[in-house]
């Protein structure tokens, strides 16, 4: 479980394998890899991945962490398109005492969405996303979504998409600051909204 508050950005060192199975290795600031264990869960661009190998020494500026990624994840998220040197958002899983500054995020991506426009000035950035209409019933104005692992508030909503309005801190702290038209971002809808909508749908279907 995660909060959608990105803790740092990692850099892709290598991404090797094929379209069925690949191994991802990231360079990450050593301070973010302390007290880590093999088998731990980390959200990378919002995708919950399992740590298979890591090395970190506080005497060194950067350590590295490794994950195995299967075909389902490669196909349904933007991780399949990662390139060497690319920045990814990283959040370690929630522990007791963690401040829940965002919203509850599972790390299970529902879809990847298309960036159709980016408008940026010195104070904020507006991003328009195109979404499969099947997911729009779970996306509400002023509701929560996770985009590339970032807990964000939904802006204007259309039948086939919605907008985001991002402050400079979000742009600096995450990889959303380098997003451009044509990019695909990982979407996880709010789990509470998803559960309520699906429950109501089942109730109505059973009471026709």
Image (tube, helix red, strand yellow):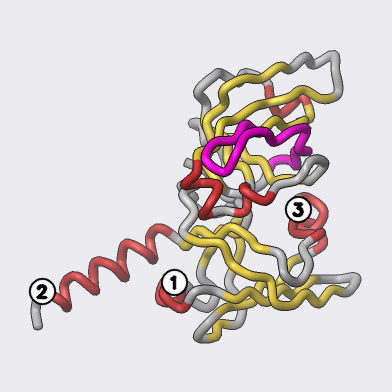
Let me know if residue 101 appears in the view: no
User: Secondary structure beneath disc 3?
Assistant: helix
Q: Is residue 7 above or below residue 110?
A: above
Residue 135 numbered tag: 1
User: How far is mark 1 from mark 2, CA to CA?
Assistant: 22 Å
Where does residue 62 sit, x and y in percent of width and height?
82, 25
Query: Do the CB atoms of the residues marked 1 and 2 lie less than 8 Å apart?
Result: no
22 in magenta: yes
* Residue denoted by label 2: 206
Looking at marks 1 and 2 on the same chain, the residue that comes earlier in the sequence is marked by: 1
Estimate the spatial distance between the alpha carbons at disc 1 and disc 3, rounded to whole Å.
24 Å
According to the image, label 3 marks what residue?
Answer: 175
Closer to the camera, 160 or 60? Answer: 160
- Helix, strand or loop: magenta stretch: strand
The quadrant where residue 184 appears: bottom right
| Of pointers 1 and 3, the one earlier in the residue sequence | 1
Q: Is residue 160 left or right of residue 15?
A: left
The residue located at (78%, 33%) in the rendering is 13
Image quadrant in which you'd find residue 131: bottom right
Residue at 73 percent across and 40 percent down: it is 8
Give the secondary structure at mark 2.
helix
Disc 2 packing (10 Å; few <14; some 14–19; many ≥20): few
Quick check: can you spot residue 95?
yes
**Relative image position of residue 41 (x, y in whole percent):** 52, 32
At horizontal 79% and vertical 45% (from top left) the residue drawn is 86
Secondary element under disc 1, as helix, strand or loop, is: helix
**Mark with earlier residue (3, 2):** 3
Q: Is residue 3 left or right of residue 167?
A: left
Which segment did they paint magenta? 7-23
Q: Quadrant of residue 127?
A: bottom right
**Is residue 33 within the magenta segment?**
no
Q: Residue furthest right?
A: 122
């Amino acid at each position: 479980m995660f909060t959608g508050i990105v803790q740092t950005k990692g850099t892709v060192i290598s991404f090797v394998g094929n379209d069925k199975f690949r191994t991802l290795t990231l360079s990450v600031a050593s301070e973010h890899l302390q007290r880590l264990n093999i088998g731990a869960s980390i959200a990378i661009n919002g995708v919950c991945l399992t740590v298979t190998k890591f090395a970190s020494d506080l005497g060194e500026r950067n350590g590295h962490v490794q994950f195995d990624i299967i075909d389902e994840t490669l196909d349904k998220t933007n991780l399949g398109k990662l390139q060497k040197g690319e920045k990814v958002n990283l959040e370690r899983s929630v522990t007791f005492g963690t401040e829940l500054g965002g919203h509850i995020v599972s790390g299970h991506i529902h879809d990847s969405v298309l960036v159709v426009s980016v408008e940026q000035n010195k104070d904020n950035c507006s991003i328009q996303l195109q979404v499969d209409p099947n997911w729009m019933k779970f996306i509400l104005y002023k509701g929560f979504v996770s985009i590339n692992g970032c807990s964000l508030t939904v802006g204007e909503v259309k039948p086939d998409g919605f907008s985001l309005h991002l402050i400079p801190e979000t742009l600096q702290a995450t990889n959303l600051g380098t997003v451009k038209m044509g990019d695909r971002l990982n979407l996880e809808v709010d789990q509470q909204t998803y559960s309520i909508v699906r429950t109501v749908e089942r109730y109505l279907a059973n009471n026709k």
